[in-house]
Image (spheres, rainbow, N blue to C red):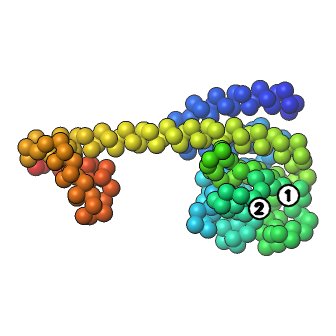
Amino acid sequence: MEWREFAEAMAQLARTLLAQESVQGTLDEIAASAVRLVEGCDAAGILAVSKGRAVTLSSCGDVVEASDQLQGELAEGPCFDLAARATGGDGERVFRIADITEPQPAWPRFATAARDLGIGSMTGVLLYTHDEDFGALNLYSRRPGAFGKDIETAGWMLASHAAVALADARTIDQLEDAMKTRHAIGEAMGILRERHKLSEDDAFNVLRRISQQHNIKLRDVAQRVRTNAPHQA
């Protein structure tokens, strides 16, 4: 794909990503777009590392989850290292293995197993904004030498668009969750006020006290009040 065509595809991708209805939808579209738009890319996935454990957030292609699982078990591999460094907020933001059939001193056990998975070359880019890391976008090819400097740049451009859309999607999900929580608490307070003739402050304090005493989230306490209300009316 020529750079002008790629730029046009990036513009369309930005709109597509922002139109997704959920964080997972955004993640899945990012992975699928990498396979669709990056020349030589046979599979793509997004990997995060949480408390030393590899977590596949999205995958497009069978080899992705197998590679992520392998790196998690070995605690070794380019995707694992890249995503793990993201948690620390420093280190490289891009990796490229031009030919995995050649010796890989940094990841000897992973490289040997990756060849058995049919991986020929790999590249990856962190998904990040100025204040948050989301994991690593990793691209796989069955043939060695698939990812040169130009393809690495294309992956970086894709990751930049994806990170902005992902940040936006997460913000929307957080806002929606906050709105649902506020609505549930409001309904529960109304039930308690009507049933026990409480003031608004007293009703909220009842919910908060139950939450603290039983170590239950306030939203879950409110949901239980709402669920049990018809049976106790």
**Picture quarter containing residue 91?**
bottom right
Return the residue nearer the eye: 9 or 170: 170
Question: Where is residue 122 shown, x and y percent of the image?
Answer: 81, 55
Question: Where is residue 216 shown, x and y percent of the image?
Answer: 30, 59
Identified at 92% across, 65% down, the residue is 102
Left or right relative to 212: residue 88: right
Question: Where is residue 161 shown, x and y percent of the image?
Answer: 69, 37
Left or right relative to 98: residue 162: left
Asked if labels 2 and 1 touch by Cβ distance under 8 angstroms, the answer is yes
Residue 197 vertical position relative to residue 121 in the rendered view, above or below? above
Return the residue nearer the eye: 169 or 67: 169
Please name the amino acid that badge 2 sits on.
Pro
Q: Quadrant of the C terminus?
A: top left
Secondary element at tag 1:
strand
Question: Where is mark 1, residue-wise?
Answer: 97
Q: Work out whether residue 224 can be spotted.
A: no
Marking on residue 62: none
